[in-house]
Each structure stands twice: as C-alpha cells, then as structure tokens.
Image: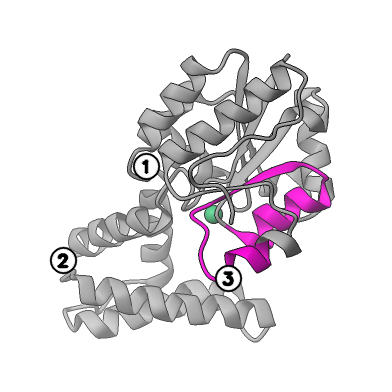
Amino acid sequence: MHHNFLFDLDQTLLDFHASEYKALGIVLTVNGLPFSDEIYQAFKAYNKSLWLELEKGTITRTELFTRRFEDVFRRCGGETYGLDPLQVNDDFIRTMSVNGVPMKGAPEFLRKLKTGIPDAGIYIASNGATVNAKGRIASTGLDRYIDGIFVSEDMGAAKPSAAFFEFILERIREPRESCIMIGDSLSSDMLGAKNASMASVWFMPEGDVSAAVKEYEIDYCASSFDSLYSILAGWAAARDSGRKAVFTASDACS
Ligand SMILES: [Mg+2]
C-alpha cells in the first residue's frame, strides 16, 4: 500500500521570499546597483500591490514586470540610464529559478519521510510557473526525495480546483484515500483538499485556527517539521493497520 504525500511548495518546503531576496541582490549587484534590506522590502510591498492590480485586471503582466523594476531603479538612485527594466526582470526571474532556498529543516524532514515511512510517495502540488518551481527544487537537491512534480502551468488546472487533484490522481494511478495534502494556504491547499475530498494537513496554521479547521474540514495541523512528521507517520501507520487515522499528535488542530 502506498502512502502519497502531496506537498505545496512555497512556504511549505521552499522559502519563496528568501529566493526572491537572493535573486534581487544578485541582479542589482551585477548591474552595479546598490542592494539592501530596505530595497528588498520596498520591492516586495510594491510588487504585492502590482499583483493585486493584475488580479483586478487594471494592469498587464508586462506592465507589472516593467513597473516593479522602474520603481527599484528609482530607489537605487544609481546610474540606471540604459538599463531596461524588462531585461532586468527576465534576469531576475531566471536567477530566482536557480536559487531555491529550502525552509529550515525541510531537507532533513524529507529524508526522514522518504526513509522512515515504507512506500512513501512524495509529490509536489504547486500553483505557478513550471521553470521556476522545477529549477528551484533542483537547485536545492531536494529532488532526490521527490517522486513527481505537478505544477498548475502544465496542467490546465490550478489549486483549489478539484480538477487539479484529479489530474494528479490519474497520473500517479492511486486512489484519493491514499493521498494527503500538506500546505500553508487555506485558499489554495486546504480548500483544494476539501474540494477533492482528500485528507489535509495545515502547515504553520495562523489566525483563527479552529474556525478555519471547521470551514475547510482540515484533518490535522502542524507548526513544525517534527510535528508534521509525527502526524504523517501516524496517518500512514493507521492506514496500514486498516484503522481510521485517529491519534493524538502533540500539535493537532485544537
Ligand atoms: Mg504555499
């Protein structure tokens, strides 16, 4: 019997913001511009507001990519004459895709999961760009523990749609009862698991946890990789013994 663990990528196994920070530092330095925490924080805030505008349809992707670097150039104050914001944006995206940063403890956790749980299938279930996801995973070496990578860009469906999960079940040829979704996002990971009638672990829960657990029908919560491992090992052992997975984890949803 296989136990299939479907992991969200960003802020679950990889630190998206750390990669962004690293990549921004590299591209600005290469172009002779200054880089600091302050510049990164300003970039992050402005970028977020631009993504919201893109979602509302008030700007295009190209405008987003152009404007975020025009803003950085203004803040850097250095010699930016002749620098093309779109070119620097391309360099930034490429640099980020080869500079993955694991969440602290993620490599040890995945190794333990792969070696400690017999018949563990470890999969990535991520929304986003394929090159960025696959490149970052490969650059951390975590791919050695991973059996398959599913990214929405390739699939014609994204979390939280049930279709996203059906696609994965079909590809891995496993029943949904053998799968558990682990992620930090309520709106994509937990809602997606609910839509697909799949077991779920909310990783790094925050806010009104008990209300969210009820609304999204979340099975387990974990605030650390140690706690996550206990939960997943307990879930797998219960399935092996044919029992319903009822056990008390130290960090279960309360
Ligand atoms: Mg995430």
Query: Distance from label 3 to label 1 (Cα)?
Result: 27 Å
**Amino acid type indicated by mark 3:** Asp
Near mark 2 (Cα within 10 A), the count class, few <14, some 14-19 or many ≥20, is few
Split into quadrants, the picture shows ligand 1 in the one at bottom right
Of label 2 and label 3, which has the lower sequence position? 2
Numbered disc 3: secondary structure: loop
Question: Is the residue 211 above or below the residue 6 in the image?
Answer: below
Nearer the viewer's eye, disc 2 or disc 1? Answer: 1
Start-end of magenta stretch: 185-212
Q: Which residue is mark 1?
A: 102
Q: At 46% from the left edge and 53% from the top edge, which residue is drawn?
A: 11
User: In the drawing, does residue 154 fall left or right of residue 86?
Assistant: right
Numbered disc 1: secondary structure: loop
Q: Assess whether residue 200 is covered by the magenta stretch.
A: yes
Q: Which residue is mark 2?
A: 32
Q: At 47% from the left edge and 27% from the top edge, which residue is drawn?
A: 143
Quadrant, the N terminus? top right
Numbered disc 2: secondary structure: loop
**The label number, if any, that marks residue 208 in the structure image:** 3
**The label number, if any, that marks residue 80 in the structure image:** none
User: In the drawing, does residue 245 fall left or right of residue 64?
Assistant: right
